[in-house]
Image: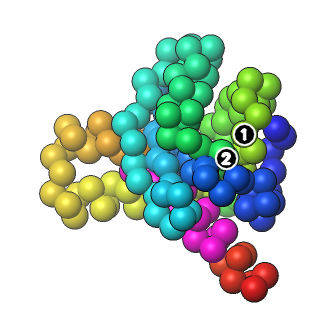
Amino acid sequence: MPVVDIAEMDDLLAQDKTVAGLDLGTRTIGLAVSDLGLRFATPRPVLKRVKFTPDAQALMKALDEARCGAIVIGLPVNMDGTEGPRAQATRAFIRNYSRLDERPIAFWDERLSTVAAERVLIAADVSRAKRAERIDSAAAAFILQGALDRLAALRRERA
């Protein structure tokens, strides 16, 4: 399935499926999954990255287990709106991954998602060591929640 705009995702998603949010890092892939009602994003354990093929297989397995029908991936855009090397790496990962998986994929601007996730974890008094383990999945949850909120707004506009 090609990359789609977030506005198209609602029409492509089966009713009994969830949506996954991804925060692609160099060492880990943060993962969050929505509920079936597409209202809430819940962080899941991070996936440790090795090489592309095992990373893709581990990701597909996690998405299948969570009954995900679509993916929203954070696009690390610079604060001035330009795309740097991290955004290019994310696009390259998705270009290769989309050849293996037919789920629709939408990019979502992830500016400051990691900062927001860290603030929430600090406010919850999570230790520095535990924050390091959970930050990527918390960022994925922020990315996914933003996309879910946008989908809900689009649904209200149509109604």
Tell me which residue sits at (57%, 51%) in the image.
18
72 over 152 or under it: above or below:
above
Q: Which x, y percent locates residue 89?
A: 67, 32
For the residues labelled 2 and 1, the Cα–Cα distance comes to: 5 Å
- Label count reads 2
The quadrant of the image that shows the C terminus is: bottom right
Instruction: Say if mark 2 contacts mark 1, CB within 8 Å.
Output: yes
Q: Is residue 59 visible?
A: no
Tell me which residue sits at (61%, 22%) in the image.
56
Q: Which x, y percent locates residue 81?
A: 70, 59
Q: Which residue is mark 1?
A: 103
The quadrant of the image that shows the N terminus is: top right
**Which one is in front, 61 or 3?**
61
Range of residues picked out in magenta: 138-152
Where disc 2 sits, the SS reads strand
Tell me which residue sits at (55%, 36%) in the image.
63
- At label 2, the amino acid type is Ala
Q: Is residue 54 visible?
A: yes
Q: Which x, y percent locates residue 85?
A: 67, 35
Density class for disc 1 (Cα within 10 Å; few <14, some 14-19, many ≥20) is: some
Q: Main secondary structure of the magenta part?
A: helix
**Label of residue 6 in the image:** none
Density class for disc 2 (Cα within 10 Å; few <14, some 14-19, many ≥20) is: many
26 over 108 or under it: above or below:
above
Where disc 1 sits, the SS reads loop
According to the image, what is the colour scheme of the structure? Answer: rainbow
- At label 1, the amino acid type is Arg
**Label of residue 70 in the image:** 2
Tell me which residue sits at (66%, 36%) in the image.
90
Query: Is 132 displayed left or right of 41 in the figure?
Result: left
Q: Which x, y percent locates residue 66?
A: 50, 40
